[in-house]
């Protein structure tokens, strides 16, 4: 499996990122390009997935961009690591559930390397942290599959502004909170993207 690794140091506009991935999907489908893992940050914006609902927007003054990924409404902004991918599932067993589990394991393994214990929840997609019996989301996942090629991605909150989540019901879940890594443990996360990429590649090869 050949995978291009792309890292963007400056914030990338959301629509430009989606256009790039959709073109890559077509190229992969025509066997003209390799799979892609792309880490970046976005400037501030709210995005809504295909299963989002109007009542999940609490502050009606915010702008929400509709997307074709799965999932609900979430927030992107500085201090949040976004990992996009375009991965050809035709090379494996064409198992979407298994692929989502692979993503969950990648995030959990990466955070565990910082001594932060997190877990996946079969009823609520994403990665969760138990903060003194308060369950809070640390990572959001939203994917789409076209022609058995998976794309979009996931995000991990590092030191982003958590107040921004007050405008929405994050990922459509009313009874749980949101946190970031700095809130959990104020340590150095500068190599998080590298650890994440290595774990992702390792898990893809299993």
Image (tube, rainbow, N blue to C red):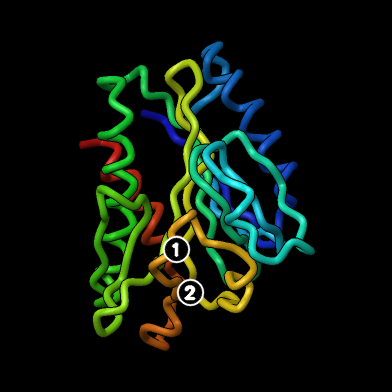
> Which of the 4 image quadrants contains residue 74?
bottom right
Residue behind mark 2: 190
Kindly identify which numbered label has been placed on residue 84. Answer: none
**Dividing the image into 4 quarters, which one contains the C terminus?**
top left
Of badges 1 and 2, nearer the viewer stands: 1
Q: How many residues crowd mark 1 within 10 Å: few (<14), some (14–19), many (20+)?
A: few
How far across and down, in percent of the image, does residue 153 sit?
A: 49, 45
Q: Quadrant of residue 119?
A: bottom left
| Residue drawn where x is 58% and y is 56% of the image | 56
Q: Is residue 164 above or below residue 104?
A: below
Q: Residue at x 27, y 43 (%)?
A: 101
Q: CA distance from mark 1 to mark 2?
A: 32 Å
* Rendering coords of residue 6 (x, y %): 57, 47
The secondary structure type at the circle numbered 2 is loop
**Residue at 60%, 34% in the rendered image:** 68
Residue that lies at the very extreme toward the left in this rendered image: 206
Label 1 element class: loop
Image: 73 above or below 99: below
Residue 174 bears which disc, if any? 1
Q: Is residue 29 left or right of residue 184?
A: right
Q: Residue furthest top?
A: 30
Q: Quadrant of the N terminus?
A: top left
Identify the residue at image location x=26%, y=36%: 205
Q: Are marks 1 and 2 in contact (CB under 8 Å)?
A: no
Nearer to the camera, 96 or 92: 96
Which comes before the other along the chain, label 1 or label 2?
1
Q: Is residue 162 left or right of residue 130?
A: right
Residue 44 screen position, x and y as percent? 71, 64
Q: Farthest bottom residue? A: 186
**Snapshot quadrant of residue 9:** bottom right
Q: How many marks?
A: 2
Image spot of residue 143 (x, y percent): 47, 38
């Amino acid at each position: 499996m050949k995978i291009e690794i792309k890292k963007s140091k400056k914030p990338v506009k959301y629509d430009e990122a989606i256009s790039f991935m959709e073109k890559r999907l077509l190229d992969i489908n025509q066997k003209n390009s390799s799979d892609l893992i792309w880490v970046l940050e976005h400037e501030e914006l709210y995005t809504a997935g295909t299963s989002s609902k109007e009542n999940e927007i609490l502050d009606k003054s915010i702008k929400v961009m509709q997307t074709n990924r799965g999932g609900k409404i979430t927030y992107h902004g500085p201090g949040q690591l976004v990992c996009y991918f375009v991965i050809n599932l035709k090379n494996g067993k064409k198992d979407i559930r298994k692929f989502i589990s692979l993503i969950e394991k990648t995030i959990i393994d990466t955070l565990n390397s910082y001594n932060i214990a997190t877990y996946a929840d079969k009823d609520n997609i994403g990665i969760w942290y138990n903060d003194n019996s308060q369950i809070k989301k640390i990572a959001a996942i939203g994917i789409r599959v076209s022609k058995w090629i998976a794309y979009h991605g996931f995000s991990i909150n590092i030191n982003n502004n958590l107040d921004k989540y007050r405008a929405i019901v994050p990922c459509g879940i009313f009874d749980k909170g949101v946190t970031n890594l700095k809130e959990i443990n104020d340590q150095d996360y500068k190599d998080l993207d590298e650890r994440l990429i290595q774990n992702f590649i390792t898990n893809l090869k299993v």
